[in-house]
Image (tube, coloured by chain):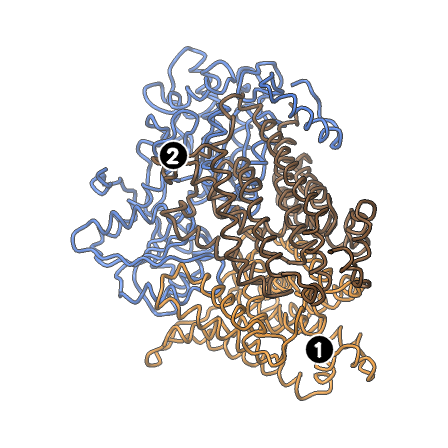
Amino acid sequence: MQSLVFGLITGSLLAVATAGFALLRNTERFLHIAHGQFMALGAFLAVVLTAQWGLVPGVLVSVTVVAGAGVLCGALLFDPVKPQGGNVLLFTSIGLAWVIYALLIAVFGTEVRIFEVSLGQGWDLGPISLAPGELAILAIAALVILGLWLLLNRTGLGRSIRAVASNRELAEVRGVPVVRVSRVIWALSSALAAVAGILLGVLGTVTTELGWSNILLVLAAAVLGGTGNILGVIAASLVLGIVMDASALVIDTSYRPVVAFVILIGVLVLRPEGLFSVARRREVAA
Amino acid sequence: MTRRRGSVIPLLLSSLVVAACAEPGGPSAADSGGASDDGGDIVFGQLLGITGDYASFSPPAIEAAQIAVDEINEAGGVLGREVTLATEDNRSTVDGAIAGYQKLVSVDGAQVLGSLESDGIVALYDTITEQQLPTICSSCGTTFLDDKGGEYFFRVTASDSDAGLIAAQLARDAGYKNMSMIVQNTEGASGPAEVAEAAFSGIEGNEVNTVTIEPGRSSYAAEVDQALSTNPDVIYVGAGIEAGLPILREIHRRGYDVPIIVSPDLILPETTTVPNADNLVAALGAFDVDSPTYESYAERFQERTGEEPSPGLYDANNYDQYILFALAMQAAGTTDGSEVASKIIDVASAPGTKVYSYAEGLEALENGEEINFEGASSSLDMNENGNLVSPQLSILRIVNGEWAPTESVAIDSSLRPSA
Amino acid sequence: MSTLPFWATVLTFGLVIGMAALLLNIEAGWGGMWDLGIAGQVAVGAYSYALLTSPPDAVVPGLGLPFWAAMVGAGLITMIVSALIGWPTLRLRGEYFLITTFAFAEIIRQLIVIQRGLTGGTFGVTGIDKPFAEYFLPSAYPFILLGLAAAATVLVLLVSQRVSNSTYGLTLRAARDNEPLARSMGTAVDRVRIATYALVGLMTGLLVAPVYVWFLGALVPASFTTHLTFLVWTGLVIGGLGSRLGGLIGAVVLTVASEAVRLISVDPEHASRLAAFQPFLVGVLLIVLLRWRPEGLLSERGAFRKRAKPLDRIRRDDPQTLEAVSA
């Protein structure tokens, strides 16, 4: 029971991180490796800013700054190479990941940082124990995901984004302002990365390795979720989180990281279109 | 050795040619460990993780090394020559250590090597032995050196076996029977933990439940849950700061209020802020705060950095190793690697006149006396394997928001595995 | 003091990455198989080599074979492991293949950490047998190692050249450019790909991994993270994906440039800024080259322009000539 709760927390954080990654993957059609570094950037900014301006303003400013940085990178670095296809975009993103990583080390140093936020002590709720802070993290993650879902499915902007995702050329012909939509997607995706990074930082610690250590799981969740609906990505993240944490009951905990990847490979080999994909799309990156 | 630093491209080309020429075993450019008593400065090498996992240990280590070098030069240098410090980053990785080592030895011409951490020491063991470079390790506890040191490798800190034994001893002496261990899957953490596990479970009626964690996760809730599932009366956390902090907070969050023995890696200011800080206890090679060497060193350290020396950061050990190098070199009368290395145990250990600074040691050596340098971190007396004979260990707790030594202990050797 | 041994060491590392990049080029550049599992293959080869040479009474016991036998053994083991991994994954295309190989490499690294009885865990394997080390002064050995690395690189280059000029290489590139067409013409695309993957594994275990092991001197799992994979990929992309020599040149430029930073002397307190320069340089090189010279320093088009004229016509825009050439 308890590990289900832990898995839910791990999974919901992963879902927030992966949702942003998947947005870019579905619309701009590339694997945004630097997404992990945007998470780290958000966490570092927030750690510094919350210490000075308090929790809420610090977090808001950090998320906004990261969103702005995302839009800038999208316009200045990624748009010009877009005609060259997903592979060039992918490696531009890897390059950007190295650059952000280097800047984080140069600016913030390599010491471990922590948020001065206490999650409180766990309440005993029958078979499970849940701390107020953990509940808050869960709630924030759920709200963010719900907000994203409403935005995508209940607004005009969301319709435009989905149109671009399903067929960019057609959307353009139909008069969707593709460039503006692309900017919004960059902002959204980067903001989601920042939120995920901050939540991860609050739960654990903030280090310059935060980006690299999370991007693999994000990739795994995104690929498992398939390219269809954002809900597939969220479901995949939750499944990964829960299975990883529940696996501790069955096998040695040192195998925990392996579990996620074994599942990933198993699913891909048996069902190459992802766990929750509706439509099959071949050769996404190639 | 007369070749000067040239531009990059011709060097690249010529090094291929040289490689081909050097093949038949011809004379090579530099016999780095060997004698080079050709005047000029003597270079002390320092190779450590300025970036990466060990980054938080490096600033005080570099300051302490500089304090030692300044002291040596003020007293007139070694063999009448100035000493300079060459510091190189190993990025806390093995390939970084190898490239940094080559740079120090061949470009900077380092005559001795200090500060390198456990994994770099293990990787470079053969190379250093072949090149006969005297190497002192200021912070590495790896059990690898327990029986492999003494010729070119020495250490001025306690071995992981000691750190593990003392953890088991602490738990035993407080009467605990049921220990849960949360251990990170890295060499520095699992080494002492294995010794502790063996020693503690070897005692009649004791139970140990070990949970292994992999660093770099977003949360360790499931692992902690598993560690708590056996209702331990004491918990051991052996992990780096990055995983250790969330684990400590997670234990508190689950409402578990028992003593927690933490590994030396967690004796850092960050851990004093966790809500269950009062439960934490750690054992560490303590600084010998009453020794005159420590007092004089601590004053200079504080002047330079504005902070107190901290056993958890091994700064005094970094100071000690360079004073030892200088004294050994002076005693050997040459910079030749194997000669210098053969003097290190002599100048560090009894018998001999006890000396408390480089100047005192230099004077005694010039008077033809045997010396025994008493360091700032400990007495530095070494056994024939270059390990400390009686590492001073003290028990640290968090007092008024700071890690402070509360009592000192000696290792009960009956806990040692009877091998 | 001489900077030569330092450069010899750096160049040795550059050649290791360069060899891996040349092999990756066969697989990804010509075969279109975007492999993010290089670190895993190198790890399998490296540990195989170390365990085959390590004496039976060492801390991590091995078989105590001479180095050349261990190289052959490591090559075969890596080949078998690669074929086993390739068999289920090569059916996957594009990013699915990419992520699966990524996952396999991570699993291999984790298993090395966990199976400490076999691999020494995070403690690692020490006391590596380096060939001919006993005949030379230790200070000369960096040059010997560079010579060995250069010899190994020549072998890898020969294999790569052979592949590029052969019908097999042609089929590989044809299947990359138009898989359905290649299939419809009776090419056993899957078999060609598995063969390629196994060949890359063989060469990795036989040459790349042993030289890397000699360079490292001791094995720890931390030497086989995704950073190694990214380094190889970056070298190849800088040099030119699909070109004959690009991977080698790109990797050497990359490692030499990033290690040259060490020769800039700075105060220790600025060292962390300096250390950040390496990833910064890698990142900027990637971004800038992809923007203004997306084919890399050397391009595939350039590589096949003179010597293998017919190949140039088998591009995506003109697949019709495939039949004529592969016949």
Colour assigned to chain B in the rendering is blue
Q: Which chain is orange?
A: A
The structure residue drawn at horizontal position 61% and vertical position 33%, both measured from the top left corner, is C9
Q: Residues under labels 2 and 1: Cα distance?
A: 58 Å
Chain where mark 2 sits = C
Where does residue C96 sit, x and y in percent of width and height?
60, 66
How far across and down, in percent of the image, does residue C19 sit? 63, 42
Specify the quadrant of the image occupied by residue B279.
Answer: bottom left
Question: Quick one: label 2, few (<14), some, or many (20+) residues within 10 Å?
Answer: some
Q: Residue furthest front?
A: C327
Q: Amino acid at mark 1?
A: Ala
* Numbered disc 2: secondary structure: loop
Left or right: B284, with A280 as reference point: left
Near-viewer residue (B301 or A189): A189
Q: Describe residue B161's horizontal placement relative to residue A120 as left or right.
A: left
Give me the disc on residue C55. Answer: 2
**Residue at (46% x, 68% y) in the render:** A118
Residue located 59% across and 31% down the image: C148
Quadrant location of the C terminus of chain A in the rendered image: bottom right
